[in-house]
Amino acid sequence: MKVELLIIGNEILIGKTQDTNSNWMAKRITKYGHHVKRITTIGDELETISNTIQKILDRKPDIIITSGGLGPTFDDMTLVAIASGLKRKLELNKRAYNSIKKVYDRAYKKGLLQLEGMTKEREKMAYLPQDSTPLPNTVGTAPGVKINERNSTIFILPGVPAELKAMFRNIIVPILKEKKGNFIEKGFLFSGIGESQIAAYTNKLEKKYPQLWIKTHPKIGLSVQVEVSITAFNVEDGEELVDKALNEIREIVTKLNGKIKERE
């Protein structure tokens, strides 16, 4: 499946908060053999969010996952912006309202909150785009949301990492498993020769094996340590091709008097 991630939050754009959510999700999506085609980060602006979700839908991904902007404050505007982008009304969802109310009632009874009841700000989190499905938040307050639009499924998740991870594991991972593809990633480290020295050889191998993504990454210095990795998505005989290409790179490194260190 093709997946796009939309990360929403002014705090990320100004460097106050580091976006760890996209990295965490991308690793797991890839693990199950699916393609993260694009990761987009934008601020908490109605028009920007609305326009961006329309542009993503035009690219026809199977799944869109958004992160952030579901809270009770004025700048948490993901739901109203996405509703606008999809040309849907924003309406009070009873299931979402009841689940939010239970969380606040429980917290008040435990003495964790001084303010009792559903305020306008708390109720705000229960207004969802028309014909959407609330997703249970087992860690926090704001429910996630699932929307079917055109040929894509949109999952709107909280930005708080613990809440996002719980929702991702409970709701999205089963879908990724059900439609699991084949992802292969192998590689090794070498030293004594730089990335630029081996680049001409890996360029030739990429033409020889167009189904594979062959990449080198300098780890320490120019030639102290370089990592070579090969990845393949849903390639027939992918394991065999990856091993074959890796062996050819090992031979090249050895001929250039480099030293190989296999991954543990």
Image (cartoon, grey):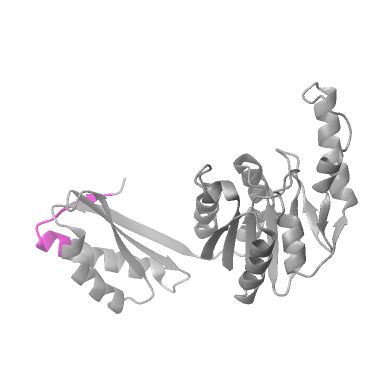
Q: Is residue 150 left or right of residue 108?
A: left
- Residue in the picture at 89% in, 33% down: 117
- Whether 156 is drawn above or below 234: the answer is above
**Magenta highlight on residue 258:** yes
Residue at position x 59%, y 50% from top?
10
Q: Position of residue 79 (x, y in %)?
A: 75, 56
In the image, what residue occupies the spot 52% across and 56% down? 26
Q: Is residue 18 left or right of residue 143?
A: left
Q: Is residue 225 above or below residue 5?
A: above
Please provide the residue range marked out in magenta: 252-262
Residue at the spot 54% in from the left edge and 61% down from the top edge: 40
Q: Nearer the viewer, residue 176 or 113?
A: 113
Q: Quadrant of residue 29?
A: bottom right
Confirm whether the magenta stretch covers residue 238: no
Q: Is residue 188 visible?
A: yes
How far across and down, in percent of the image, does residue 198 sit?
A: 18, 65
**Relative horizontal placement of residue 104, taking residue 40 as reference (left or right):** right
Q: Looking at the figure, which quarter contains the N terminus?
A: bottom right
